[in-house]
Image (cartoon, rainbow, N blue to C red):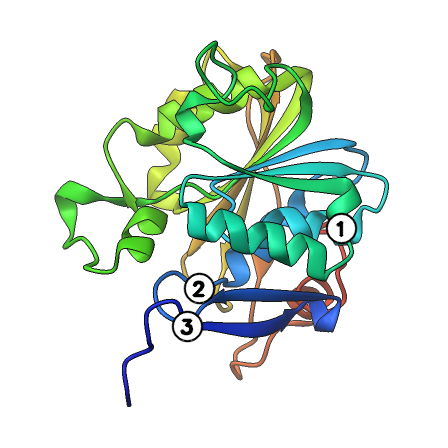
Amino acid sequence: MAEPTPGETTHDAVLGGRLMLTQPKAGHRVGHDAILLAAAAPAAARRMMDLGAGVGAAGLAFLTRCRQAEGVLVEIDPTLADLARANAAANGLTARCRAVPADVTALGRPAGPPDVAAGDADLVLMNPPYNACATHNVSPHGGRALAHDATSDLLEGWVKSAYRCLAAGGTLCLIHRPQALAEILAALTGRFGAVELIPLFPAPGAPAARLIVRALKGRRTPPALLPGLVLAGGDGRPSAAAEAILRDAQPLA
């Protein structure tokens, strides 16, 4: 099979065709994580930020489901930020959404992007890079590396940025690997509470492959482990609950 040409894109339908996304053919590709993250976010939110948005999948999926909300898509890669902006326009969301090319860790700081104000969001979505650079071979593809590779202090830096961006009582909603749970809780401590943990299982009886974490800024309530979601049945077919989220744009219960 021929290698994709640099800059080549594909046009893909998600949410059962409710959302169309243009994305690079090579490098990081939109998967279920972004859609599940968006489905886990509270529908009552009005001012959303998607940190590390890529082509905008999570943020745009949330705005497609929650039509009263507005959003900001923050992406450090200017090419992907341009695609996020184009995807918002292609899906009729320009009036409620803008894309900002910026480093997540600069948000809410005096020297950060002026169009992202501290305390301006009531919801932050976050799908941070989750592979520790010291424990695996970094992808030779730059876009894939930016999306997947994490330094040891990256997660805490992103959580701090989310804290600065959120208003008091605002919700942080992130997806990560379950193996990072201790690191996630450490980053949240002193900043977020009322933490809800939702494991995602690839099949019945299988260990969780992903973990969705919801937390409230400024709260001190202890964490709670909620019922998980099984993505596929024993026959390998998507579960009815997963289909409702991934195809029918339903929220994660």
Examine the rendered structure and indicate whether residue 47 appears above or below residue 241. Answer: above
Q: Residue at x 44, y 30 (%)?
A: 104
Residue that numbered label 2 is attached to: 29
* 2 or 1: tag closer to the N-terminus: 2
* Disc 1 residue type (three-letter): Leu
Distance, label 3 to label 1, CA atoms, is 24 Å
Mark 2 Cα shell of 10 Å, populated few (<14), some (14-19), many (≥20):
some
User: Would residue 79 be seen by someone viewing this image from the given angle?
Assistant: yes
Distance, label 2 to label 1, CA atoms, is 21 Å
The local secondary structure at tag 2 comes to: loop
Q: Nearer the viewer, mark 3 or mark 1?
A: 3
Q: Residue at x 79, y 40 (%)?
A: 43
Q: Residue at x 35, y 38 (%)?
A: 180
Residue 50 image position (x, y, % from top left): 58, 39
* 3 or 2: tag closer to the N-terminus: 3
Pick the residue in front: 160 or 200. Answer: 160
Q: Does residue 186 appear to the left or right of 239 in the view shown?
A: left
Examine the rendered structure and indicate whether residue 157 appears above or below residue 86. Answer: above
Residue that numbered label 1 is attached to: 93
Residue that numbered label 3 is attached to: 8
The local secondary structure at tag 1 comes to: loop
Examine the rendered structure and indicate whether residue 79 appears above or below residue 124. Answer: below
Residue 183 image position (x, y, % from top left): 34, 29
